Image (cartoon, grey):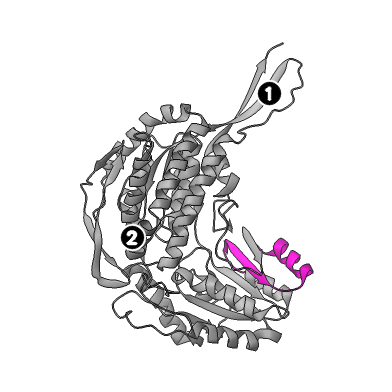
Amino acid sequence: MESRNWIGGEWQDPSGDEMVVCNPSALQEEVGVVRFSTKDDIAQAGEAARRAQAGWGALTPAARGAYLFRAAGLLEASLAEVAELASREMGKPITEMRGEVMRGVHLLRYYAAEGVRSIGTVIPSNESGVLQYTKRVPLGVTAVITPWNFPVAIPLWKIAPALLCGNTVIWKPAEYASLTAVRIAELFEAAQLPAGVLNLVIGQGHAIGDVLLAHKELDAVSFTGSTATGLGIAEQCARRNLKYQTEMGGKNAAIVLKDADVAQAVAAIISGAFRSAGQKCTATSRVIVERPVYETFTEALRQAVNSIQVAPALDPGAYLGPVASAGQYEKVMSYVEMARREADILAEGGAAAGTEHGYYVRPLVAAGLDSSHSLIREEIFGPVISVLPADDFEDAIRLCNETVYGLSASLFTRDLRLAHRFLDEAEAGMVRVNQETAGVEYQAPFGGLKQSSSHTREQGQAALDFYSALKTCAINFG
């Protein structure tokens, strides 16, 4: 497979450099070739999106939703094919990837249905004979910049509400999700989306990112990725007065209190920490355990880690597959080596047969670290977690909040009073009790506090607020 741009309803071969994509589960297998765009490709995409916007925005929301509904049916029919391609491209285990593709189907149908929901409110006027009301209107041309760790779900939870609200889109996916992006664009083409409404531009972020953000046709930007890149995007958008949202990093904590159901906590923490090889911004990275249950919990955690199945992504039994790329492998392994040098290793899972020629990182649990240590403070984005003891609930909350990030956090307890205190006191945008830190249902708002987010929200009704402007209207009919 070879990547292509989809601009103005036409498929084009980018004119920049190219990269061979190898399966991170088996590096000897070539998945395809990704060809990168130049600034001229960005210019074409911007012009196509601007030309298409007026016509697209003039459609009723219900008419726009009908295109999303058709795309959902096509994606569901292609579920197995899209999931396999994505697993081969970026290494997520196939069972997880199938679930992600199905989430994409649900997202498309959810936003398709939003096309018949109210888009404003009537506001009483102080004057008689005056009708005053609000309505949502499109922003215009929106840039959607997406990561590789959720190659289907994250693009769709941005693209679907953006299109429903009447915007046209320029989509730049991550390099290691570009082949999957082409397949998704093909499905939108098959849904007969009008030319120029969605424009796919394949490229390297450092080469075309600034060009995209500086493009004169742009009205808004939605970005998911690293904190450093997100802060840079926010600065550029603020300078141009563009509407923007940035979803960035996390260093998410799970607190286990002395009255917790240990088996439930261990199962949820293992899933939150090690599914997708820990490559989720909501992944559990710190585990804070009240001292009376510390030994019992860590022993149960050690046994669970030892039983984790590490296997190639297309193995249906794989619980943990490879990380996505050579760069990701080098980064995560630098933290693994740091843990082996400077921490107590509570558990380190083994590797299964068939994992000799891929980017596999064994799940690792570290302990014996101060809360100021790099393993506790920095986002690793891999299957590495650290365990910290806490004296009591107050100490656990203090440790939970001792981070520049604030994406997600969870608490395990049977005490309803402490559960509600946690929901109030944890400094995170998504807080959960007796559930893992990772994952939020598609109809619920997604986003963080502090350095994790620009303080807008994705998914659910909140996405419609971002992708539209509110217009206040009044007419004197007296």
Residue placed farthest to the top in the image? 478
**Lower position in the chain sequence, tag 2 or tag 1:** 2
51 is higher (above) or lower (below) than 76: above
Q: How many marks?
A: 2
Q: Check residue 472 in the rendering and tell me which mark sits there, or answer none.
A: none
Quadrant in the picture for residue 212: top left
Q: Relative to 147, is 451 on the left or the right?
A: right
Residue placed farthest to the front in the image? 77
| Residue that numbered label 1 is attached to | 132
Q: Check residue 85 in the rendering and tell me which mark sits there, or answer none.
A: 2
Residue 243 is situated, as x and y percent measured from the top left of the image, at 50, 41
* Residue 225 seen: no
Q: Relative to 230, is 405 on the left or the right?
A: right
For the C terminus, which image quadrant? Answer: top right
307 is higher (above) or lower (below) than 39: below
Residue at (55, 82) in percent of width and height: 369
The residue tagged with tag 2: helix, strand or loop?
helix
The residue tagged with tag 1: helix, strand or loop?
strand
Q: What amino acid does circle 1 point to?
A: Gln
Residue 407 sits inside the magenta stretch: yes
Q: Which residues are magenta?
A: 401-427
Quadrant in the picture for residue 32: bottom left
* Residue 63 seen: yes
Residue 156 sits inside the magenta stretch: no
Residue 259 is situated, as x and y percent measured from the top left of the image, at 73, 79
175 is higher (above) or lower (below) than 236: below
Q: What amino acid does circle 2 point to?
A: Leu
